[in-house]
Image (cartoon, rainbow, N blue to C red):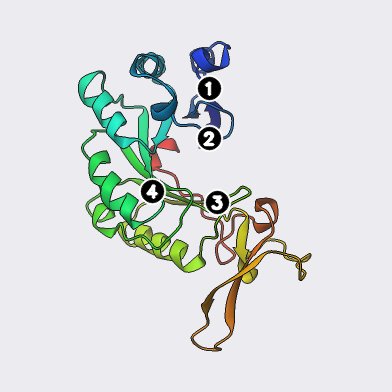
Amino acid sequence: MKKISTWIPSQLSGDPDKPLICKNPTIYWVSTKPEQGDLFFELNFFDIKRIIDVIEKCPQHTFVIKTSYVERMRFLFSSICHVTSNLWIGVSVRNQDDADCFIPQLLEINASVRFLICDPLLSKINVRQYLSRNMINWVIVSGETGKNSRPTRSDWIRSIEDQCKNADVPFFFKQWGDWCETEQAQDCSKLNLKTPCKIIDINPESFCPVSTWKIGNKRTGRLLDGVLHDGFPNETR
């Protein structure tokens, strides 16, 4: 698979645009900051158009842009410029309301790869109708991090993974985030009475509470039921 990197465009970083310098095929996540940023929230259309111009000059690379502002993205690509064949576009969906509102708008944009990034995943989501028609080509799921982070649940993640599997759509599980159920955690050796904990369900067989613990994303890990999910669209391989 191609090397994966983050590209912060020159008008934000002050550095030369590395996709123009790098000749080795690379997947670039386009962002406004090292962690996460949203071009369509932080930049005007003129600056975004300059970024698209760089993307068009680098057909050897693949570029990935995600946004929570799909209306602005739709306007840009319908009125100002087009989606190049090496550009993947995605929308952030946290819950069913986001999915019902944002996905139809994303589907109005013609692109070789359209994806969903459920980051953070805050409820169970049904996107089956969009996967079965091959409209969405990739799904990424992640839990939340930060001081006020909220837990995600394994059954919510499994539901999306099952929907992707049934539709033959690649599924990528990024991380649990700060919260994780005990049996899912990569490292729960230091749990104690002071560890923040929430009861999220009752096991229907044992009638025991299902708990999730705030232990930090370095200890929760990326495994779902002991399995690493690193699905990518085929054309990256």
Extreme-front residue of the structure: 148
State the CA–CA distance, disc 4 to disc 3. 13 Å
What residue is shown with label 4?
Answer: 93
Instruction: Identify the image quadrant of residue 210.
Output: bottom right
- Mark 1 touching mark 4, by CB under 8 A? no
What residue is shown with label 1?
Answer: 8
Image-based side of 166 in relation to 154, left or right: left
For the residue labelled by badge 2, is the local secondary structure a helix, a strand or a loop? loop
**Mark 4 nearby-residue class (10 Å; few <14, some 14–19, many ≥20):** many
Instruction: Identify the image quadrant of residue 92.
Output: top left
The answer to which of marks 3 and 2 sits earlier in the sequence is: 2
**Mark 1 nearby-residue class (10 Å; few <14, some 14–19, many ≥20):** many
The amino acid type, in three-letter code, at marker 4 is Val
Residue appearing at x 76%, y 71% in the figure: 193
What residue is shown with label 3?
Answer: 144
What residue is shown with label 2?
Answer: 36
Check the image and report above or below for 140 versus 127: above
